[in-house]
Amino acid sequence: MTGARLGAGAAPGKIILLGEHAVVYGQPAIAAALSIGLGAACEAHPVPRLRIPAWGQSGLDITLDGSRLDAVGRAFAAILAVVDPPSRAVLVTVDGELPLGVGLGSSAAFAVAVARAVADHAGKRLDQAQILAAAAAAERVFHGNPSGLDHTVCTLGGCLLYQRHATPRFTPLAVARPLDAVLAWTPRAGSTRQAVEGLRARHDAAPAQYDRLFEYMGALTRAGEQALAAGDADALGRLFDLAHGCLNACGVSTPTLEAMVHTARSAGALGAKLTGAGNGGAVIALTDGDSQPVHAALRTAGFQAAICRIGG
Ligand code: PMV
């Protein structure tokens, strides 16, 4: 077929290694790109269309034909408007292993992968600022006024230190080597916003006590920065365990998350913690080496899980 050019794009998922929730109170957090993510393929098509076979009950198939759009459709339109305004006649198909809606950056990975695929199809070379702009437009559709952490990590990769109100807000971190880990996840009860608001209410009832806890969580993040720079997986695992205890004290863990953390530790993980907002969502278990026993134990216990690497 003449002109049947295929564009391709990919983006990693993201994970918060240390500092979630405390980051809302000014403490630093560390986020990392995951070795699992999403890929997008783009081809010419009479009307703009997006297909995501793995999302929704029987897959998503959205055509931008002037009819009312859901958030995914509006995010797709926002990406096209930034990346390729004159010619929007493309079919984009998105696929990948990244689980949806559990705090692993699926919406940001979607946006970055689609932006890259559409640009590639149009023969455009986007710089990082342009990809960030396209992804930010999509993330605003999904999340209103997001911090930018997810799409920044999904675009830049590696590990980043993030601190609100700091300049710069994102600092790339030196990582001695990528580390092996296992992810497990369970559906979330409520949104990130609800988890943050719940903790805000607990904080406001006893600010001095919570502020000390958040300061300690910030100190764990700083120690994590050292552990990553040294490639010290034992130290990072210990920090994960301590951080998980703090997040439990913050009231954002659940019996299922506790069971996943205990299962991973009993199977030999160097440390395990919930990641992101909590109230369900994902757990990360550091393995540094053979991830199979931890992965198998989580699967045997009935949890969804995947082997991955962080910091690559
Ligand atoms: O689970 P996620 O990726 O939505 O992460 C939320 C991180 C929090 O610190 C809980 C909230 C925030 O805005 O930083």
Image (cartoon, rainbow, N blue to C red):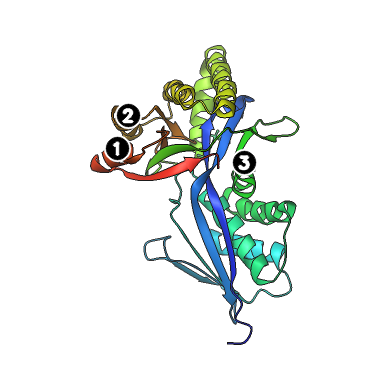
Real-space CA distance between mark 3 and mark 2, rounded to the nearest whole angstrom: 31 Å
User: What residue is rendered at 48% in x and 30% in y?
Assistant: 198
How far is disc 1 from disc 3 in space, using C-alphas? Answer: 32 Å
Say whether disc 1 or disc 2 marks the residue closer to the N-terminus. Answer: 2
Q: Is residue 77 above or below residue 187?
A: below
Ligand 1 quadrant in view: top right
Q: Are marks 1 and 2 in contact (CB under 8 Å)?
A: yes
The numbered dot on residue 149 is 3
How far across and down, in percent of the image, does residue 131 sit? 68, 55
Ligand 1 closer than 8 Å to label 3 CB: yes
Give the residue displayed 32% in from the left and 29% down from the top: 268
Q: Which residue is mark 1?
A: 293
Instruction: Tell me the kind of residue under disc 2.
Output: Gly
Q: Is residue 100 above or below residue 58?
A: above
Asked whether, in this view, residue 63 is left or right of residue 257, the answer is: right
| Residue drawn at point x = 35 percent, y = 44 percent | 305
Q: Quadrant of the C terminus?
A: top right
